Image (cartoon, rainbow, N blue to C red):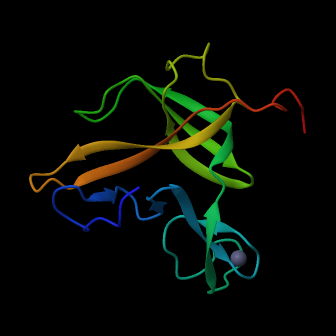
């Protein structure tokens, strides 16, 4: 791949959320409470679970399981519908995300479905900086029939 690009301008890529890490191996990162290990994607002064004030940054696994989902038919102007809004359990960390590369209907989206993180360009500004978002797409997993 190439050397790190400039932060703005032609050829640059910027994640749409600050917890999305781009590069050759895109992933999500979370703030983990050092006291109780609760994980949050937004910046917090104190842990919502235990009140501790110290966090470390952790990498969130890019493989997950669909815990719940909603097929969204009505959205803001400019947002293409229908789409699938889901809660994905990434080995214990809950991630709210859109499911992509799957037809948005209950025949194709199932609870417990194995998914993996994907990034996709969502637009380019007038200077050529590309905004990059993320979603989850269906993934094949050999032990998918096993129940916990
Ligand atoms: Zn905590």
Give the quadrant of the N terminus. bottom left
Residue 123, position as x, y percentages in the image: 23, 44
Q: Which image quarter has ligand 1?
A: bottom right
- Residue under the point 20% across and 56% down: 129
Residue 134 drawn at (x, y percent): 45, 46
Say how many tags the image has: 0
Query: Is residue 11 rendered to the left or right of residue 107?
Result: left
Task: Answer with the quarter of the image where residue 137 lies.
Answer: top right
Between 138 and 46, the one lying in front of the other is 138
Q: Residue 70: give x, y in percent of width and height.
A: 54, 30
Considering only vertical position in the picture, is 11 above or below 134? below
User: Which residue is nearer to you in this view: 51 or 131?
Assistant: 131
Q: Which residue is drawn at 74% across and 55% down?
A: 92
The quarter holding residue 56 reads bottom right
Residue 64 position (above or below residue 3): above
Looking at the picture, does residue 32 appear above or below residue 73?
Answer: below
Task: List x then y, in percent, for residue 74.
Answer: 36, 27
Residue at x 70%, y 71% (from the top left corner): 49
Q: Which residue lies furthest to the left in this view?
A: 126
Residue 52 falls in image quadrant: bottom right
* For residue 24, side relative to residue 36 (left or right): left
Asked if residue 142 lies left or right of residue 76, the reply is: right
Residue shown at the point (30%, 42%) measured from the top left = 122
As displayed, is residue 41 above or below residue 117? Answer: below
Specify the farthest residue to the bottom: 53
User: Which quarter shows the C terminus?
Assistant: top right
């Amino acid at each position: 791949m190439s050397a790190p690009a400039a932060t703005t301008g032609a050829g640059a890529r910027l994640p749409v959320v600050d917890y999305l890490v781009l590069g050759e191996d895109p992933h999500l990162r979370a703030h983990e409470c050092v006291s109780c290990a609760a994980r949050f994607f937004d910046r917090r002064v104190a842990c919502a679970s235990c009140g501790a004030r110290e966090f470390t940054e952790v990498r969130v696994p890019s493989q997950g399981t669909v815990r719940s989902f909603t097929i969204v038919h009505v959205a803001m102007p400019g947002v293409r519908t229908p789409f699938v809004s889901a809660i994905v359990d990434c080995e214990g960390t809950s991630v709210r995300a859109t499911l992509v590369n799957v037809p948005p209907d209950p025949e194709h989206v199932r609870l417990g479905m194995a998914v993996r993180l994907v990034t996709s360009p969502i637009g380019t500004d007038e200077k050529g900086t590309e905004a990059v978002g993320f979603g989850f797409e269906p993934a094949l997993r050999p032990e998918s029939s096993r129940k916990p």
